[in-house]
Amino acid sequence: MRDQFGRKIEYMRISLTDRCNLRCIYCMPEEETEQIDTENVLEYDEIIRVCKIAAKLGISKIKLTGGEPLVRKDIEVLIKRLKNLEGIKQVTLTTNGVLLKEKMQQLYESGLDAVNISLDTLDRKQYAQITKRDQLSKVLEGIECAMQYTGLKVKINCVALAGCNEKQWVPIAEFAKNYPIDVRFIERMPIGTKESFNIALQEEIQKCLDSAFGCSHKEENIQRGNGPAKYWSYPNFQGKIGFISAISHKFCEDCNRIRMTSEGYIKPCLQFSEGIDLRTLLRGDVGDDKIQEALEKVIYQKPRCHIFEQEKKEGHLEKHQMSWIGG
Ligand code: SAM
Ligand code: SF4
């Protein structure tokens, strides 16, 4: 369906858990300050019910996220069920990759269409500084393993952190040179933990990559995913380089998504806290028509845009961590 500004909403990010086996400095504090009680986390039957209704409203693509979605038990069972829903054309996953190798075969067999793997550095020591865990080798094994599966689209996501991982932008971009996979650089958004680095903007990253790889050209007419990434080609690269630049290149006009947290809270915009608590409806004595109405309402009322750039912010801003929202 379309929202009040005429945007077609067809993509839903579903957080399966707020738990994570890493503690990325820009996403989740070391000590778990806020944790969703397990009984409040939606069960797979409840998620399926929501998705069935959402599909009727035009949601056709689902991204499973978290926290770390692979820490949730039997995720492959959920993927298989989602893939069988009428109207759902694509089910994808975003993961930190730590558990990917051990889960990959089951994920593939369940029909997973694509996997995005988060990787901010190839330096073991720095990886442990950023994520607070020494797990780089497992992530690299996960990436290597995922690349073996024919038909599975693999992407790498790197949050660019000024004063931290600049020296790693080129080595990480080289994945797209050496393999047929896309690498996307994400501008850190001012949501989540207080501890943070300065934001590295797209221009700075591009400058760095251009001087290493030569002139790039923008791919104006290709749609490579469901999201806001804009892509560039570099000479002799097998994959593309993408940028998700919510700060320097605001993309709200083309936003096509809603989010559902693991406790069933529907968020129409990343930055604002307004949304709808579907869990109460799901667990109350209401029919699908009432849930559909609630979803229609929240989609229609999706805010026009984020206001990260405003110093004096208005509205009810999101106070939760990114790990709760699902990125
Ligand atoms: N744990 C999984 C992972 O890391 O891919 C999925 C959840 S994570 C919240 C989803 C995405 O959000 C990751 O690519 C992560 O790098 C990104 N992310 C987290 N905090 C962010 C922030 N403050 N700004 C921009 N991206 C962020
Ligand atoms: Fe965990 Fe992903 Fe957040 Fe890192 S970005 S703390 S891996 S949820």
Image (spheres, helix red, strand yellow):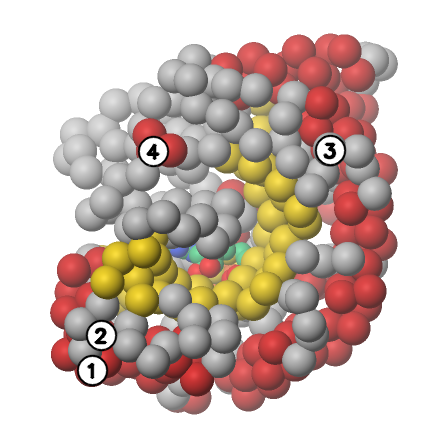
**Which of the labelled discs sits on residue 320, or is there none?**
none
Q: Are marks 4 and 3 in contact (CB under 8 Å)?
A: no
Q: Is residue 119 visible?
A: no
Residue position marked by numbered label 1 in the rendering: 212
**Cα separation between marks 1 and 3:** 44 Å
Q: What x and y, as percent, mark residue 242?
A: 35, 60
Q: Amino acid at mark 4?
A: Cys
Q: Amino acid at mark 2?
A: Leu
The answer to which of 97 and 108 lies nearer the viewer is: 108
Picture residue at 65% right of the left edge, 66% below the top: 152
Label 1: element kind: helix
**Which of the 4 image quarters holds residue 177?**
bottom left
Label 1: how many residues lie within 10 Å, few (<14), some (14-19) or many (20+)?
Answer: few
Q: Are marks 2 and 4 in contact (CB under 8 Å)?
A: no
Label 2: how many residues lie within 10 Å, few (<14), some (14-19) or many (20+)?
Answer: many
In primary-sequence order, the first of circles 4 and 1 is: 1
Q: Are marks 1 and 2 in contact (CB under 8 Å)?
A: yes
Q: What x and y, as percent, mark residue 254?
A: 38, 33
Nearer the observer: mark 4 or 3; the answer is 3
Residue position marked by numbered label 3 in the rendering: 87
Q: What x and y, as percent, mark residue 209?
A: 22, 74
Label 4: element kind: helix
Q: Amino acid at mark 3?
A: Gly
Nearer the observer: mark 4 or 1; the answer is 1
Label 3: how many residues lie within 10 Å, few (<14), some (14-19) or many (20+)?
Answer: some
Residue position marked by numbered label 2 in the rendering: 209
Label 2: element kind: helix
**Cα separation between marks 3 and 2:** 40 Å
**Which of the 4 image quarters holds residue 76?**
bottom right
Residue position marked by numbered label 4 in the rendering: 252
Figure check: 145 above or below 231:
below
In primary-sequence order, the first of circles 3 and 2 is: 3
